[in-house]
Image: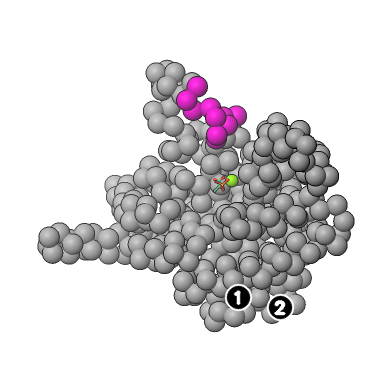
Amino acid sequence: DDDLVRAVDRVMRHADGVRRLGVRANADTPEDAARARRFGGEGIGLCRTEHMFLGERRQLVEDLVLATTDDQRQAALDALEPLQKTDFIGIFQAMDGAPVTIRLIDPPLHEFLPDIIDLSVKAATDQATSKDHELLAAVKRLHEQNPMLGLRGVRLGLVIPGLFTMQVRAIAQAAKEVPGAKPEIMIPLVAAVQELESVREEAAAILTEAGVDALIGTMIEVPRAALTAAQIAEAAEFFSFGTNDLTQMAWGFSRDDVEAAFFSRYLDLGIFGVSPFETLDREGVGRLMRIAVEEGRSARPDLHLGICGEHGGDPDSVHFCHEIGLDYVSCSPFRIPVARLEAGRAALTQSDSDTR
Ligand code: PEP
Ligand code: MG
């Protein structure tokens, strides 16, 4: 057994020695961050902050979303900020100076609102208060037919004043308390450079005032963002491909619903061999990525490029990421060893073909 462990270590070291791709983790708790480091993660490529608003904090989020006055909204944000700061301190400490890409909140709104059916049932009873009726009315106003294409990501930041600002302030304050902390701020679901510019300006001002250095970048997960990457790169220091959404939007397949209904037919027809949500579809989604890499780098030669969709830990997709010249892949902590190995193999395969 010891021989096996030593052999595996040797292979991993070899892979690490030759690979050109960095390997980061998707992690949003200090526990996951610590696990990521144990598996050899060189940073966090995606810290999803929406998870931090569930559980006991749900009430504050409801207060925020349903606020009808500036004061109500600000009170909810003021209550959330110190909690967020604590979240980030824990993650920065666990990462011990390695970069942490924090994605500003990207919730499908329906996951944060009280359930409309529960509310309706309650409102129909004699015990219903006027608050229950108000809540039901507010939730009905915010109801969406397609929440995954709705008020998510940067759109939410643009319509709820102070939401992103609160998060950026919490990041800056946390970074000041953890020596060596290396935050990067990532804006989700951007489709147009103007969305990014508006958020970026405010975020940059907060960072400057706090004296904190942090890259500001964007997810590339909406096809329009990939196609207008030259413009977007003017306002982004890094791109991270969100290939879960990019796949959903390129194919028009719902991430949540569609697979069971007809994927087996697509497999029969040979349209794909495995789900494009698992292995990157090189012809379609991959083409969008190539365009974004080329345009982005032509506008900003030092643009950092990564991927943080599920594909970042899929062997074939890791090879593709190497081929198109990304700087790193980011995947769940448990998939890091595979990503390191495949990144090494991709580099070796390439140098084989270079010398042939
Ligand atoms: C993605 O869309 O690929 C992504 C990483 O973001 P999320 O899965 O949180 O939408
Ligand atoms: Mg996404």
> Relative to 28, is 69 on the left or the right?
right
Percent of width and height locating residue 150: 71, 39
In front of the other: 19 or 278: 278
Give the SS element for disc 2.
helix
Residue located 47% across and 25% down the image: 260
Q: Position of residue 125 (x, y in %)?
A: 75, 35
Which SS does the magenta portion mostly show? loop
Is any atom of residue 179 visible in this view? yes
Mark 1 neighbour class, 10 Å CA radius: few under 14, some 14 to 19, many 20 or more: many
What's the CA distance linking mark 1 and mark 2?
Answer: 10 Å
Q: Residue at x 21, y 63 (%)?
A: 10
Of the two numbered discs 1 and 2 on the same chain, state the one appearing first in sequence. 1
Q: Residue furthest front?
A: 126
Residue bearing the label numbered 2: 210
Residue 301 in view? no
Identify which residue, 95 or 18, lies in the foreground: 95
Question: Residue 132, located in which quarter of the rendered image?
Answer: top right
Secondary structure beneath dot 1 equals helix
Which quarter shows the N terminus? Answer: bottom left
Q: How is the image coloured?
A: one colour
Identify the residue at the far right of this view.
69
Residue 225 belongs to the span the image colors magenta: no
Q: Residue at x 83, y 44 (%)?
A: 130
Q: Which mark is residue 175?
A: 1
Residue 67's label in the rendered image is: none
Q: Are marks 1 and 2 in contact (CB under 8 Å)?
A: yes
Specify start and end residues of the magenta stretch as a single range: 251-261
- Residue at 80% x, 63% y is 74
Residue 208: x %, y % from top left? 73, 75
Residue type marked 2: Ala
> In the picture shown, does residue 264 fall above or below 289?
above
